[in-house]
Amino acid sequence: MRVLILGGTREARDLAAVLVGEPDMTVTTSLAGRVRDPALPAGETVIGGFGGVDGLRAFLRARRIDVVVDATHPFAATMSAHAVAACADVAAAEEPAGPGSPGAGRLAVPLLRLARPGWTGRPGDDWHRVRDVAAAADRARELCPAGRGVFVTTGRRELAPFATDPDRHYVIRAVDPPTGTLPPWHTVLLGRGPYTVEGESRILREHDVRVLVSKDSGGDLTAAKLAAARALGLPVVLVDRPRQAGPAAPRWPDVPGVLAALRAITPRRPDGPSPDRSDLGRRP
Ligand code: NAP
């Protein structure tokens, strides 16, 4: 069975590491190519976009992909939507489905979503949830006195909303150096998780940070900053995950769940019939 993982997360790498050991599976992981030195998964890797829905659909056909696992970052909403559309389009082309036909309502290229849950607050947290990064910049300005620091961990590509503020010190952490317009008063810290509570606390103290800004990425790789903010009594502005419009793929929160779903539809007999993929449209 040929599995395409839409990657860019630790969970995607964990899944690839497991699947390369599966006797009946071949694994390809695609990466957006956003960072200069990406952590590469086991198995084949393709880097760079597909060229929209049409490009992804062509890739699925050319590689005769049997299953797609969308393990992209929770904020990579465009890629997730493209995956849904491309798998559905392949279904329409290969398996015309009318009411009552065997393929009705089913994806011909099944699509699974592997997405870690968002973070949940604990006693002592002072979280301010907002819709997007622009709203996060506004809220951070309200919460942080002039002359103090804002720790921005929302990535290097969406810094414009912070750039218009000359009055606060923006401590920006990113994997690669930011390229767009930056706030007049800023410090860039290059880093890649996992981080420790001790290290995060040191950053907050050394830069006189009064507000932390983060996306609700979930997972434990970057969660230490939340514990550090809690311990220091600092507010956190948390950007909510984007909502996906339209149909969504069946979803699992972790690698074992996806693995079980994949194994359930993998024939264990080498000479057996084609994989039965009918289970994949349903949640476990
Ligand atoms: P996006 O907005 O969902 O996708 C934009 C385009 O990037 C897609 O249309 C696709 O190009 C390409 N792309 C994205 N993920 C891909 C993958 N796994 N394989 C191949 N192509 C892929 O995603 P984004 O621009 O990468 O990021 C959006 C948000 O996610 C940002 O907030 C970012 O901070 C966060 N994020 C993303 C990653 C990541 O690895 N992508 C990691 C950490 C955080 P085509 O249309 O040409 O196919």
Image: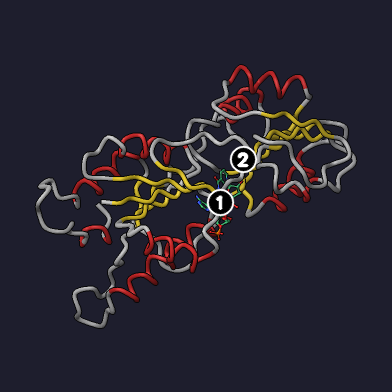
Q: In 3D space, how far apart are the residues under numbered discs 1 and 2 (Cα atoms)?
A: 11 Å
The location of residue 88, given as percent across then percent down, is 37, 69
Element marked by disc 1: loop
The location of residue 177, given as percent across then percent down, is 73, 36
The location of residue 218, given as percent across then percent down, is 50, 39
- Can you tell me whether the CB of the residue at mark 2 lies under 8 Å from the nearest atom of ligand 1? yes
**Residue 64, quarter of picture:** bottom left
- Can you tell me whether the CB of the residue at mark 1 lies under 8 Å from the nearest atom of ligand 1? yes
**Label 2 is placed on what type of residue?**
Val
182 in relation to 232, above or below: below
Which residue occupies 26% across, 45% down? 25
Numbered label attached to residue 48: 1
Which residue occupies 29% across, 67% down? 108
Mark 2, residue position:
35
Q: Judge the density around disc 2: few (<14), some (14-19), many (≥20) Cα neighbours within 10 Å.
A: few
Query: Outermost residue, bottom direction?
Result: 99
- Mark 1 or 2, closer to the camera: 1
Question: Which of these two is toward me, 172 or 133?
Answer: 172
**Label 1 is placed on what type of residue?**
Gly
**Residue 242, quarter of picture:** bottom right
Which residue occupies 66% across, 27% down? 233
Q: Judge the density around disc 1: few (<14), some (14-19), many (≥20) Cα neighbours within 10 Å.
A: few
The answer to whether the residue labelled 1 contacts the one labelled 2, judged by CB atoms less than 8 Å apart, is no
